[in-house]
Image: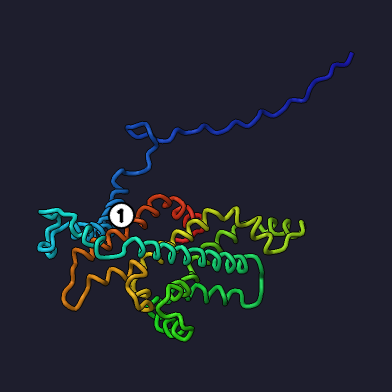
Amino acid sequence: MLTLVEPSRPPAPTAPPVRDAPATRAGRTDRGPWWRGIGGHLVLAVAGVASAFPVYWMYATSLKPAEDVLDQRLVPDAVTLDNYAYVLANLPFGSMMLGTFAMAAAVAVGTVLTAVLAAFALARWDFPLKRIIMLLVVCTWLVPVQATMLPNYVLISQLGLLGTVTAVVVPQVVSAVSVLMLFQHINSFPRELFDAATMDGRSPFNTLVTVLLPNLRPAIAAVSILAFISAWNEYFWPTMVLRGGDQLIQVGVRAFLTSEGNDWSAMMAASGLACLPVFALYIALQRQVVDAFVRSGLR
């Protein structure tokens, strides 16, 4: 009688023993000496204090009485709100804030429109001289604003727009950094997504509106916020093209700088009031700005 004998199998390989990571006194893995991160945090703390100090000095000066405005002490001895009351009584502050808000909102909308269309064209299609156009976009980002103010002023003058808010808006609706940010986001989408939209019978504009824009909301929000804040904080260009001082708050603060003398406490109070909406906007939406920069790869 025959019996079947199963062939012997080689023993299964055993995994090498896993070594436990060295633990610190708190029971966590050792990531190096604790003092290595102090240098970086110290640099960031110094940079943060240096950036916040001018803002603190502006509000501290605005709370000083007129006779103590040139006092160099960090903490004012006497605090008063008379400067804010004087500014609200002598400037059409409400109308200027509304005009500035409308101007900044128009710049933000125009920047988003031009940036989305330009970034979509550069990321979606391959065409001659594409690399050169991308290089030119980057180069315009590196050109200082002061170098383009005179040509822009001549062009605005020839168009007959001097003295209008349109003259403030038009040169600011194209932003190279916004185009590059949205280009990085659109370029990260898989090519198969565009091919599927084309096979589905969608036109390029339909693909942009129905497929890309819903997925670009964080980046568009960041571009809008940055464009709004940049337009709100712009001072020199509105001062050049606007002849009246009662349209925008950036130009209205010049009312306290006269040939008879400068009322620095009132000017600081007006500047402090003008900064409050921007501070509130950025604090409320700073997460979208940071996320957009991190996802786009820009630093």
Residue in view at x 42 percent, y 82 percent: 153
Q: In which quarter of the view is residue 9 placed?
A: top right
Which is nearer the eye, 34 or 58? Answer: 58
Whether residue 246 sits left or right of residue 162 in the image: it is left
Where 242 falls versus 285 (above or below)? below
- Tell me the quarter of the image containing the C terminus: bottom left
- Locate residue 120, reporting x and y percent: 61, 65
Quarter of the N terminus within the rendering: top right
Pick the residue in front: 111 or 92.
92
Residue at position x 50%, y 66% in the image: 111
272 with respect to 215 (left or right): left
Name the image quarter holding residue 164. bottom left
Q: How many marks?
A: 1
| Residue 162 x/y as whole percent | 42, 80
Left or right: residue 118 versus residue 159 is right
At 19% from the left and 78% from the top, the residue drawn is 259
Q: Residue flagged by tag 1: what amino acid is it?
A: Leu
> Residue extending furthest right?
1
For disc 1, the neighbor class at 10 Å (few under 14, some 14 to 19, many from 20) is: few
Query: Under tag 1, what secondary structure?
Result: helix
**Residue that numbered label 1 is attached to:** 44
Q: Nearer the viewer, residue 297 or 38?
A: 297
Closest to the observer, 3 or 207: 207
Percent position (x, y) of residue 109?
51, 64
